[in-house]
Each structure stands twice: as C-alpha cells, then as structure tokens.
Image (cartoon, helix red, strand yellow):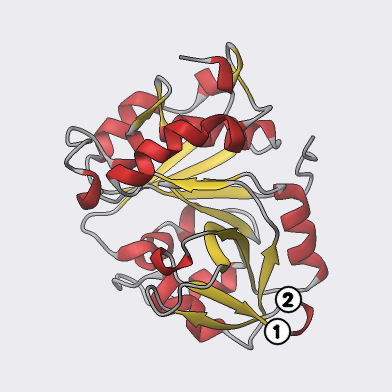
Amino acid sequence: MSQLVTHPLDVAILCGGKGSRLRSVVSDRPKAMAVLRGRPFLEWQLISLREAGLKDILLCTGYMARNIREYFGGGKQLGLRITYSDEPEPRGTGGALRSALSNIQTDPVLVLNGDSWCNVDIASLVDFHVTCKAIGTLALTVVANPERYGQVRLGKNAEIVDFVEKSQSCVTGWINAGLYVLSRSVLSRIPENACLSLEHDIFPQLVHNGLYGYWGEHQFFDIGTPTSYAQAEQEFEHVFHGVQDDHGVMGMMV
C-alpha cells in the first residue's frame, strides 16, 4: 500500500488540451473528461490523489473549461478542494502552468498531465525530490514502445542528462510518465503569457541543473489516442488496483 503524502503539496493538473488525436472517439468533451469505466478519466485521477492524502487540487483548464468546472465544482463531493486556472488561449503545458502560478501555495508542487496516469508512490517521489534537493523530479517508467514517447537518459545519482526525441530509438528505456514534482523557481522562470511546452522547452533547459528522474517499473497508461484509450480500458485494474472510489474498489466498477 502506498504511503500518504505528509509534505505540504498542492497538485496542478494540466487538462486544457483539445485532444485532437482522440476526436474520432471522444468529440463532445475535453480529453481529460473522456469516460473510462463509467467516470471521466480526470475523476479517476482525482480519487487516486485523494487516496494518497492530497486534497488541494488546481485544474489548469482551457478547451471546454466550463464542462470540467460544472462537473467537479469545488470538489466537495469528492472530499477535495478544487480551484481553477482557465487559459484565455492555448499556451502549452509550460504556459498554462505559469498562468496558474499565483494559485499555487506550496513549494514544491505536484504537476500531472490530465491524459495519463502512473501508479508511482507519490510520497516516495516527493521524499526523493526533497532528499536530492532537486529543482524538478520526473516520474519515469518503462514501456515496450518508447519511440512513441521519447526517452529520458539518466546519469550519476539519477540526475537527468538527456532527452531523446520520439521515434529516434526503438529500444526499451525510461520514459517521462507525465507526473512531476517541481519547485516554484521552475514555474517562475517561464515567461508570462508565453506559449511553451514543459517537455520540449522547459525540461531540456534544466538538464545538469538539478533535474532528476525517479525511476521504476511503474504501471502506466495514457488516453491520448484511440488505440491507447482502448488499451487503458484493458489495463485499468493493473494501473488503478487497490484504489478506492466512493463505491468500493475501482476495478469492480462497470
């Protein structure tokens, strides 16, 4: 069983994307609201975070933001405190997070992509980040097809030394699992109103400057494409095993 997070930690979830690649199967809602086992994917993420002891959630919304806000409200029904940061126009993952900085109270902050989930022990991830005195820590896992995601290369003491772009290698290796612990200094260095990607514009600048990888063979999936969305249905119990929703064990829902 995972430990509870005891370090003060706000959570920011990046859920403003249109999900263009998913439009053939999910066309009436934001990507993070794609239904999985009877609930929006974002709701499964929130329940999992609550199980880890995390209650203060900031949703960084954009496309069809009203859809998300009307569904979750202030989070009371889930036992959470949910606030919102709405993008006036698309600014990428980095820009969206910079826009939300004034709503983030803790240092560091846990950041998640709203279209993927990795069942890493968040408490251990945070402890690793603090022990390493990292400026940022990325949860890493292994998949059989890293060419779709790109790879992360580690050096001494798990410090990240390089990012390998998608399709440049077909060798099984570490990938970015879309879950990060970041210091406020990472967010504050992003220019205001800029359109930037955390993965492509921000993280490469932090290589050799305190960016670490918390690696392990953690269960992982994403819902970014019709194929991976269908695969998420198949792998649901493996990734969300043991997590309780408001009606029992997640994997028992239909």
Task: Residue 143: name its quadrant.
Answer: bottom right
Query: How far across and down, in percent of the image, does residue 56 sit?
Result: 58, 39
Q: Position of residue 242 (x, y in %)?
A: 69, 27
Residue 81 appears anywhere in the view: no
Neighbor class of circle 1 (other Cα within 10 Å; few <14, some 14-19, many 20+) is few
User: Where does the image place residue 188, in percent across and percent down from the top left?
Assistant: 50, 73
Location of residue 182 by image quarter: bottom right
51 is higher (above) or lower (below) than 117: above
On screen, 187 above or below 240? below
Residue at 40 percent across and 42 percent down: it is 84
Residue 234 is situated, as x and y percent measured from the top left of the image, at: 46, 32
State the mark number for residue 49: none
Residue 66 vertical position relative to residue 7 in the rendered view, above or below = above
Q: Amino acid at mark 2?
A: Ala
Looking at the image, which residue sits at the far bottom? 208
Using the rendered image of the protein, determine whether residue 200 is visible from the camera's viewpoint: yes
The residue labelled by disc 2 is 158
- Left or right for 97, reference 9: left
Question: Mark 2: few, some, or many residues within 10 Å (few <14, many ≥20)?
Answer: some
Q: Quadrant of residue 211?
A: bottom right
* Quarter that holds the C terminus: top left
Cβ atoms at labels 1 and 2 below 8 Å apart: yes
The residue labelled by disc 1 is 155
The answer to whether residue 53 is left or right of residue 195 is: right
**Which residue is rendered at x = 70% and y = 59% of the image?**
216
Badge 1 amino acid: Gly
Local SS, label 2: helix
